[in-house]
Amino acid sequence: MQENQTAGCCSLGSGPLDDAQATRYAGLFKVLAEPNRLRILAQLAAEGCAPLSVNDLTAMLGLSQPTVSHHLQKLTAAGLLERRRRGRHVVHTVCPGPFAELRTVLQMD
């Protein structure tokens, strides 16, 4: 009886992962495992996920422009942010889809 109780409490919300899923999610977690990237995401979320430019983020976070640009590039390449041109500026917004996937993977039933 105890075996049945423990088996149900430790299943992931998405069930077993195949090799491709495990590789994809590990890549996303790797990109997120950097403090400045988490700060950038937190700042975007704090602004209501409104589009922000490199200059906006540089001023808000106190990081250099090359540092912010580097991290935005990594987050965008991973599919966590979307990059769009608005006039003369490039702005970045959060892509909610990958975060929903990660929440599902991490959710313990």
Image (tube, rainbow, N blue to C red):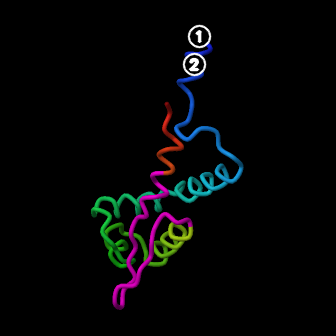
Q: Is residue 88 magenta?
A: yes
Question: Which residue of the protein is positioned furthest toward the top in this rendering?
Answer: 1
**Which residue has dot 1 on it?**
2
Question: Which residue of the protein is positioned furthest toward the bottom in this rendering?
Answer: 88
Q: Is residue 67 above or below residue 45?
A: below
- Identify residue type, mark 1: Gln
Residue 104 horizontal side relative to residue 18, left or right? left
Q: Which residues are magenta?
A: 78-100
Residue 95 screen position, x and y as percent:
43, 64
Q: Nearer the viewer, residue 60 or 75?
A: 75
Q: Is residue 12 magenta?
A: no
Categorize mark 1 by other alpha carbons within 10 Å: few (<14), some (14-19), many (20+): few
Q: Nearer the viewer, residue 7 or 41?
A: 7
Q: Tell me the quadrant of the picture where the N terminus can be found.
A: top right
Residue 72 tag number: none
Which residue is drawn at the image coordinates 62% and 52% (left, top)? 26
Residue 96 screen position, x and y as percent:
42, 59
Q: How far, Cα to Cα, is label 2 from label 1?
A: 6 Å
Label 1: state its secondary structure: helix
Label 2: state its secondary structure: helix
